[in-house]
Amino acid sequence: MSEAVNMNYNINNIEALWPRINRTYKFDPQEKRSVPCDAFDDGATYTIQFKMTEAQAKDLYKQMAAAYKAKREDSWPDKFPMPFKKEDDGTFSHKAKLKGAYGVEATRKPAQYDAAGVKLDDDFLLTTGSTVNIAIAFTPYHGAIGTGVSLRLRAVQVIELKPMEEQSPFGAVEGFEASPKEDDNPFADVEEPKKAVKKAAAPAPDKGSDDLSSIIDDWDD
């Protein structure tokens, strides 16, 4: 009999990537992007991707492995594939999600809180680059879709909110520019100091998949 394992877990101080938790979204193959949808639509989910340090990823992996071991059935493989993606900056990314509905019952929308633990408005829009804590529940699985441990999103706490950046749909063209005229600019006669040219640092060597494999082997210990 497997020892009791806490299937709930908090991942703290991680960077939010493309959070879509203000309502349910689904991927639209025609638009090739996620679009708002009804909770009962096929593929409707609340989703947040996130970036974490190697130390955070290592701890999360160990917790997921313990949850998998606790729920593993005899027909399941002993281990599940490495679920994280290693980024160029040495961090690891993953995602947590919650289906909009299970059967005929809509799920409860993941709650969002500020740093003081006060619940945010229902339509609060979290931004990419914000620092957050997330509460998740481990859900081990094995079947036609593969083998692993999904992270079922329960709640999000916003530690630092990054201002939303509105991107222009246009490229730069020749024409009107909103820069102030020299006559109106009190600093027009001030000469800008010359910037020292820094020598570009040599790129870090690409450790490749062998490095990732060695990390995974260490994590299994």
Image (cartoon, rainbow, N blue to C red):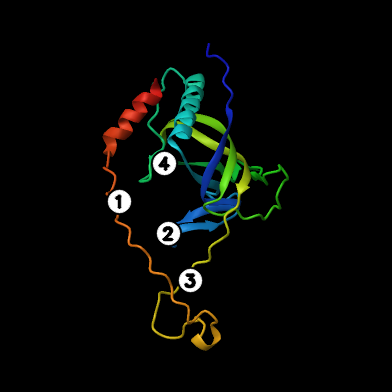
Task: State which tag comes first along the sequence, 3 or 4.
Answer: 4
The reply to whether dot 3 and dot 4 touch (C-beta < 8 Å) is no
**Mark in the foreground, 3 or 2:** 3
Q: Residue 182 placed where, x, y %?
A: 49, 86
Q: Residue 28 placed where, x, y %?
A: 47, 57
Q: Is residue 106 left or right of residue 36?
A: right
Q: Secondary structure at mark 1?
A: loop
Q: CA distance from mark 1 to mark 4?
A: 20 Å
Q: Nearer the viewer, residue 146 or 157?
A: 157
Q: Is residue 185 left or right of residue 77?
A: right
Q: Secondary structure at mark 3?
A: loop
Q: CA distance from mark 1 to mark 2?
A: 37 Å
Q: Secondary structure at mark 4?
A: loop
x 62%, y 55%: residue: 125
Q: CA distance from mark 4 to mark 2?
A: 27 Å
From the image, tell me which residue sits under label 2. 32
From the image, tell me which residue sits under label 4. 91
**Mark in the foreground, 3 or 4:** 4
From the image, tell me which residue sits under label 1. 201
Q: Nearer the viewer, residue 200 or 162?
A: 200
From the image, tell me which residue sits under label 3. 168
Which quadrant of the figure contains the C terminus?
A: top left
**Mark in the foreground, 1 or 3:** 1
